Amino acid sequence: MTLTFASWNINSIRARAHLVKDWLEQHPKCNLLGLQEIKCEAHQFPTLFEEAGFHVSVVGQKAYNGVAFISRSPLTITTDHLPGFKDPAARYIECEYDGIVVGNLYLPNGNSGGEKGFQTKLDFFDSLLRRDETLRLAEKPYLFMGDYNVCPTEEDFAPKALSESDALIRPETRAAFRRLLWSGLTDAVRACYPHGPHYTFWDYQAGAYQRNSGLRIDHALLSPRLADCLQEVIIDRDERGREKPSDHVPLIIKLEAP
């Protein structure tokens, strides 16, 4: 049996609920969609999904951040925050779906708030690494998917798309991402496409999408057991060409059920 999970920074669910609903209708085999940057509190999340028969779980925040799951079957929420991460922002939700633990995350950008803001980004990485260890010791298949706000290598952003001092490519950011890989996690995109530009984000400014001046900052990292089940990865680039789209596109992960 194939399971399909997807991750999408929607950049305001209330502004783009119709795009998400259309996408789900066009992808009937998607079992679970994780959204980031929903930019609303839980009670403000659009009701059209539940009215259509979907199951929705939300960790929201007024006007900023926020993460959610939309599923075709009931979910077991394992935690509504990243254990050990002290910042109160709504950036993590985790569920168990068909025996697989799925962490849906929106990692701090790190470019605002000076060095303190950047440290918050690194603190999230540290807490995620500890969560990785906890789940690994529990011998559960798991993955962490979402907007990591990191371009792991030079191939992961278009030339001149970022300044050398940008938090998305600072050495400390990349080192924190590498620690997750060194712990045994697999970058699903690079497992299927080892080289080349495979962007998931294009800025709204200066015709970035039309020029393909993009970034790869949305990732799915798979536990060793789940990496063996990986079948396919799709970056749904066409969504960026729709009217009033998010600046991110869906990242789709297809897995053989473990």
Image: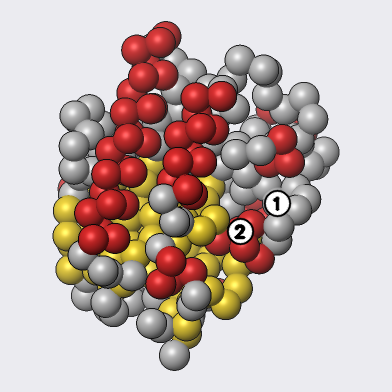
Residue 193, position as x, y percentages in the image: 70, 61
Residue 31, position as x, y percentages in the image: 40, 75
Q: Is residue 10 placed above or below 115 in the rendered structure?
A: below
Residue under the image location 44 percent in, 79 percent down: 3
Q: Residue pushed farthest right?
A: 211
Amino acid type assigned to the residue bearing label 2 in the image = Val
Q: Which residue is mark 1?
A: 198
Residue 78, position as x, y percentages in the image: 17, 60
- Left or right? Give the position of 53 relative to 117: left
Residue 43, position as x, y percentages in the image: 18, 48
Q: Which residue is mark 2?
A: 189
In this view, the residue in front, 221 or 78, is: 221
Q: Is residue 234 placed above or below 113 in the rendered structure?
A: below
* Callout 2 crowding tier (Cα within 10 Å): few <14, some 14–19, many ≥20: many
Mark 1 touches mark 2? (CB < 8 Å): yes
- Left or right? Give the position of 230 relative to 238: left
Residue under the image location 57 percent in, 77 percent down: 231
- Left or right? Give the position of 208 relative to 168: right
- Please identify the quadrant where the C terminus is shown: bottom left
Going from the N terminus, do you reach mark 1 or mark 2 first?
A: 2
Secondary structure under tag 2 reads: helix
Residue under the image location 62 percent in, 48 percent down: 200
Q: Is residue 148 placed above or below 194 in the rendered structure?
A: above
Q: Residue pushed farthest top?
A: 114
In this view, the residue in front, 218 or 63, is: 218
Q: Which mark is residue 241?
A: none
In this view, the residue in front, 47 or 141, is: 141
